[in-house]
Amino acid sequence: MPIIDLHCDTIMKLYENQNSNLLENHFQIDLKRLHQNDFLLQTFAIFLDKQQYPQRKKTALHMYQRFIKELEKYPATIGLIKSQTDYYKNKAKKRISALLTLEEGGILEGNIENLEEFFQLGVRLITLTWNYPNEIGTPNILYWDKEKQILADNQTGLTKFGFTCIEKMNDLQMLIDLSHASDQVAKDVLASSAQGIVASHSNARKLTPHPRNLSDELIQKIADKNGLIGINFFDQFLKLKQPTDLPTAISEHLWYMYRLVGENHLCFGSDFDGIPVHPDLSDVNSFSKIIQALKQKGFSTRQIEKISYQNAENFLLHYLPKGEVK
């Protein structure tokens, strides 16, 4: 079964382990395992924590350079895509496509020119926030009452710069990622953006109360905007009332969202290399377990194909720039 995955943090692993390589490593993702599992596309995030790396843009550029050097070693196996044309070329040559993203809009440091610079480098999606406020907006985690398992009502949404970013991302045809963002930031984006919107690695809050998961309202609003939701493999976002293995929990979250919004808005957003290794889903080889769990849950082969790659492929080919992007 071909696979497209909307989120991983492998670039961070490569950056923090300078002697490692993308072809074969001890992380959760490498090229050999992606190829073995019939991957069409893997989205790679440039992620950093500003407490560890206060020079946000400078560090992100170093991460970018580290990743590009790895891609250049294996041109027959993987290629960065900036447009639909790039994806078609890779698919024809049986190369894995790499889609580059920023996770944490604070990397832009409140400067719209930095957004344009990262676009020119090949970034095609931005996760607006991480787990602290930035110049764009605030994350849900700030508003979460752990005891009551509810969100505070007095949330702030997009900042003035945040609205400017959304407008510019629309102009550039950059995808907007709502994972981590506060509910109010998400609502502001959904009300103001015409460009492709995803929650690249988030699950259903109704099944697992957690600020990183999506309310039913947001799941429906994302679907109404022809958006995508990538299921996250982190056990804390998958916990159910009845303990179960993670592949089964993934199938439960997908089934719940399928019953809410249908089969056309669901995909994978593993978060591999950004989450702890779990024996149920230790690495990218675990996708076969998930496919089996989806079958057991009652998803048809056609529906599993949609979740595994077709929905994400259709979405990217609709919203990415069409021709060559220099």
Image (cartoon, helix red, strand yellow):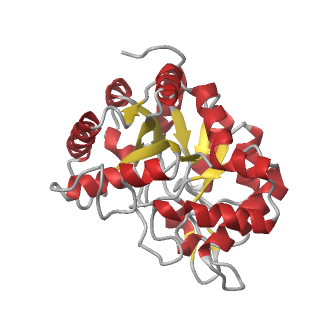
Vertically, is 2 above or below 288? Answer: above
* Outermost residue toward the left in this view: 19
Quarter residue 161 falls in:
top left
Most foreground residue, 79 or 49: 79
Most foreground residue, 95 or 297: 95
* Residue 259 position in % (x across, y down): 84, 57
Judge left or right: residue 238 versus residue 44.
right
Q: Residue at x 33, y 62 (%)?
A: 27
* Residue 44 position in % (x across, y down): 41, 45
Q: Residue at x 25, y 45 (%)?
A: 63
Vertically, is 104 above or below 239? Answer: above
Most foreground residue, 238 or 166: 238
Judge left or right: residue 11 versus residue 217.
left
Quadrant holding the C terminus: top left
Vertically, is 186 above or below 205? Answer: above
* Residue 55 position in % (x across, y down): 20, 48
Q: Residue at x 68, y 37 (%)?
A: 191
Task: Decide if residue 158 is in sight here.
Answer: yes
